[in-house]
Image (cartoon, rainbow, N blue to C red):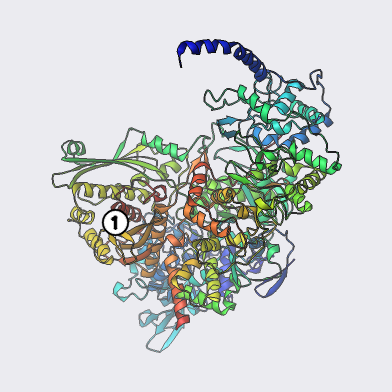
Amino acid sequence: MNTPLSLPELPLGDPVNLSRRRFLASTAVGALVIGFGLPLGSARVQAATANAAERGTQVPAFLEIRPDGSVRLLSPFMEGGQGTHTAMAQIVGEELDADPATFVVEAAPPGEAYVVMENGIRITGGSMSVRMSYPTMRRLGALARAMLLQAGAEQLGVPLAELTTQPGRVVHAASGRSLGYGELAGRALDLPVPDPASITLRDPSQFRWIGKPVKRLDAYDKSTGKALYTIDLKVDDMLHAAVQHAPRLGMTVGSLRNQAQVEAMKGVHSVHTLPGAVAVVAERWWHAKRAVEAIQVDWLEAAADSKLRAMPADFSTDKHREFLAAQQGPARDDEHEGDVAGALKNAKTRVEATYHNQYLNHAQLEPPSALARFNPDGSLEVWLPNQAPDMFRADIAKRTGLDPARITLHSPLLGGFFGRHFLYESANPYPQAIALAKAVGRPIKLIWSREEEFLRDVLRPLAVVKFRAALDDKGLPVAIEAVSATEGPTEALAGKQGDKIDPTALEGLTGKSYAIPNKRIAQIYVKGPAMLGYWRSVGNSLNDFFYEAFLDELADKGGHDPYELRLHLLRDNPRLTTLLKAAAELSGGWRRGPYTAEDGSRRARGVAMASPFGSHAAVVAEVSIEHGQVKVHHIWEAIDPGSIVNPAIVQAQVAGAVALGLSQTLLEEAVYVDGKPRARNYDLYPILPPSRMAQVHVKIIESGEKMGGIGEPPLPAVAPAVANAVAQLTGQRIRSLPLSRYTFS
Amino acid sequence: MNTRRFARTAGWLALPCLIAAGLLAWYVTREPASPFEQEQATTFDPALVSRGEYVARLGDCVACHSLAGKAPFAGGLEMATPLGTIHATNITPDPGVGIGAYSLADFDRAVRQGVAPGGRRLYPAMPYPSYVKLSDDDVRALYAFFMKGVQPASEPNIPSAIPWPLNMRWPIALWNGVFAPTATYAAKPGQDALWNRGAYIVQGPGHCGSCHTPRGLAFNEKALDETGTPFLAGALLDGWYAPSLRQDQNTGLGRWSEPQIVQFLKTGRNPHAVVYGSMTEAFNNSTQFMADDDLAAIARYLKSLPGDPQRDGAPWQYQAAATDTRPGAHLYATRCASCHGLDGKGQPDWMPPLAGATSALAKEAASAINITLNGSQRIVAAGVPDAYRMPAFREQLSDQEIAQVLTYMRSTWGNTGGAVDARDVNKLRGHTDPASSSPIILHMR
Amino acid sequence: MELRINQKAYQVEVDADTPLLWVIRDDLGMTGTKYGCGLAQCGACSVLVDGNVVRACVTPVAAVAGREITTIEAIEADDVGKRVVAAWVEHQVAQCGYCQSGQVMAATALLKHTPAPTTAQIDAAMVNLCRCGTYNAIHTAMDDLAKQERA
């Protein structure tokens, strides 16, 4: 059975009268940038793919305005829940003078035109989308408005200066005439794009949508099952595929013991051998999945020259942690100020402690999938979840030998990502889908079962950090040293870059604002056998836990309240002082406890801060112990991202980041035994259930400083705030995660 | 005692002691007789090898003597015994580490009497007290299979981790003298051929009693055939409660028809239950490969073993659950009901009912606790892994929560197993591991 | 076998043990019901069977033949479902949205049985996982729905 997603049913050049539903569906088959009545290959489309003189100025590549006035915006960024599509509509709509509610936003294809961030790359990650494209996307909206005004002037035959706009319309006040954007779009988008320098942006005091809690554009579709993710897509003549991966990365297929038997199973189209995997292609995914599980493979150990990081048969996470803890060096400094050695030597009090964290899986709810189709002309279309379309297309070109221009990449909605959908050599299904589509000569949708996903997911890194600190005679820290034995995700993926330190390895230990005159933050690089990746908040997700929990140890040792100590160490930093006080105020005033709550439970609070991805956050957590486990009642979080676009989405992102932060704090842990993950599904890898969620209270502070990120920054301070609260409540120091490894009484 | 008198007394005793010791030494190291002493098997008819492979299936040799991913029958399975850990040995025809140098008589003594060449006694983890009932023909066929059907593998044997003096093997001979029968199966004249075939498989190669018959103080099975009422009456072993295979209404097969027993052994599931725990291995490697006639024979025999209402209690009857505010009821609704149903009736034959399940009626809660903590191993029927499996809850539910939900399950819908203690959950949690979610296939060739 | 889904009858040719989830998604092309774990752990595949919430990934299709199945595709045809969707939009619950079909189905099932659930009843019934952490928003939406009913 075919949904209306098949190509022939959709006249790409003529979207008039398409319902919104089909309008959305049309992305699934992936029109490039379609203007009115313009065939592919028109001047406009080519303009969209040519090199830009200036970023984000190729208006026709981004915008299509339909006769009914609705605006289709191709977003450089992927929507995976973080609300970036809505934010883009707000930013562009504000300057275009079009209500964001009239927007339909889809992910743009690969192409130079969509490189809009100030750092010159295009990824959806690092909490960069809005903050790095904000001025460019505003200007884009303004350029489009200028083109509509120009078209209006031509159509109405009046001087440009006499025209103005109101949302969705060009207005000639003098004559009382007006034209909807939809009526002008055909003419407007064929006009040359004006000189960006000639554009005046709207005064922020006049913003109607930026800074307002505009409703998400995808809320309805996502509440009614209408939103389409890669896993949902279907094209004509498509077959389904499932894989069974080698039990350890790097192993290869030796022989299949029962190929004939599996080929004879119901619904099976064919059985295939792939690098490090076997696959079954079938008419139904369920058939493919059952058949591929039935294949009895004799796996061969990884070859010595394997390009993949081969997982040894004796790898265990517990042993690897002990190995990291035993490393003595050499260490390389990332931050080194003052005389740490001297301060430690002359210290009144010295404090030492060793911390560690745990490996984590992404565990996004949508299992990875990819849909690949070779077209009759030899071109290739691929639908896949991704956070960086150009990198993925380049990789596909490399793998297939096809010219990138012959590869169409579609980027559907992401069913969660959290760092999962970067280009991970060993952890993406699209190379398999492409190989199978080529082998069977029909389109293939490949879905990794949840079990295969847990087997191949890349891990959030593990670190063992040894702290030393010196306190003066007032009990105040004068020196801090942190040496982390770890491997960062970037150096795991790209290889060690000479002497350069991977910033993602130490961020969160580095970049702290506390006034401690002597400090040294260093890394002992230890290449591990586990393949690593980026996980929401990356290095900060672990390092802020280490630092902020150790800071509480220093406060206790020095006889200071941890909140007061932080204020003292931030005394010359008004922005963070304001932020910390805001978090305390949000929680009803700093109160460490323990105390007895209304329900009779004993509770305590902890505080922590973090400054990741250009934003700053302060968290107060309230905890109690229930049946020997930690219960987190409240999280009060103050966050200063400089300025914001949508307070409602920011609030939701904070709540979501808190949930993930609690999840890694309370219960998540990827455990490997004998080179294999112990968990292959959520049963043995529990993620935060509703019953463990805290009530989240958010205070957004717009300091007016440079805009920072929002997807990741609220997460890192959660773990230390909880750990500090637990330490205060139980008297037990928390130096590792997750807390499920502890028993409290 | 006066030292001198002791010496004199000792002197008097010395002679009989010496004689006894000599007799003992002979007894505990002797190689028992085998009917095959004079038989030199050198060529093996393929049909005989194939017949031997079937006997090996009946005996489930592969379950202990093979590890997934290693050569078939190269040994290695770790087994906990009351004395310490031992490992199953390499029984491939490798002449060095395996049994390649065994004559048919050597092989017979090992299989049926538990005596290796040189008189060394095998631990009764090797079920020779059951295998002794194997017919001469089956032993001959089995030997042919191991000599010609199995590839030699040089995987070295792992020494046992049993400390001295417990690692001395000779006392086993004495144990054998008391507990191990010495005769092959003899058909019962009053019973038909089907029954006798069933009795033979159940008591002999199938060694069902190894798990299902309760054991005495010396770890001996309390009965080895139907003449003893403890035979197959249910037993706790290795963290699982193997239920009664007798006609007990609650904890046995009283409510199962013969075709349902056959279906269970052939497909791993029937309307009453789905294989789990150690039975999954027995099913995956052995029972599903048994011929339909043999399964029918087993069913016939098992149906002839009377139950014991006194031990078993009043027969279970379904009762609809009343409104229940216990924490276990809520846990059940959210964690279990998707598969096993709010009414406890399951979705037969895929997800088993918990209403009336032996794990919900037996006093022993080990199986219920174990599967809740660790989930189910994959059932591989006719080469295809199961569509549905039981998740492991050890990382999601505390000891207390597991006790609560199992207490609910064992006291609802007419179930009478009763309360589960969180301390028992904790004990099992400590010495069990979660089941693998990957199918484990043990090959015989 | 014949399935009744969203008030329509469908003839499907599938094995009896095929999970309802894959019949809905692959055979009938209704993709609003999501595959998350296949092990009744996450709830993304929640559908209604005779008004009760059921996890379609562990429901052998033969077990629901002839019974009334409701999927997210027909949620707004149901008065309660329509109100749930409205509350979900009003309170901006969804983030990535992948679990929300299941959340909406679970919410609808609860409200059909208990129109004005207490906090404890909401906690007891809304147990589906959400990796984006929309739990607070779900609770707010549910509280609001319960309040509407009481008013």
Corner quadrant of residue A617: bottom left
Within 10 Å of disc 1 (Cα), the crowding (few <14, some 14-19, many 20+) is many
Depth order, front residue of A209/A296: A296
Corner quadrant of residue A643: bottom left
Q: Chain of mark 1?
A: A
Depth order, front residue of B334/A182: B334
Q: Amino acid at mark 1?
A: Gly
Q: Which residue is found at the position 51% from the left and 51% from the top?
A: A392
Percent across and percent down for residue B44 are 82, 25
- B132 lies above or below A15: above
Depth order, front residue of A737/A745: A745
Percent across and percent down for residue B83 are 55, 31
Number of numbered discs visible in the structure rendering:
1
Q: Is residue A125 left or right of residue A348?
A: right
Residue at the outermost bottom position:
A175
Q: Which residue is found at the position 29% from the left and 55% from the top?
A: A608
Percent across and percent down for residue B16 are 62, 13
Q: Is residue B148 left or right of residue B274?
A: right
Name the quarter where the N terminus of chain A is drawn: bottom right
- A69 lies above or below C138: below
Residue at the outermost left position:
A473
Q: Is residue B197 left or right of residue A537?
A: right
Percent across and percent down for residue C16 are 72, 60
What residue does disc 1 label? Answer: A606
- B244 lies above or below A64: above
Element at label 1: strand
Corner quadrant of residue A90: bottom left
Q: Would you say residue A550 is visible in this rendering?
A: yes
Q: Would you say residue A193 is visible in this rendering?
A: no
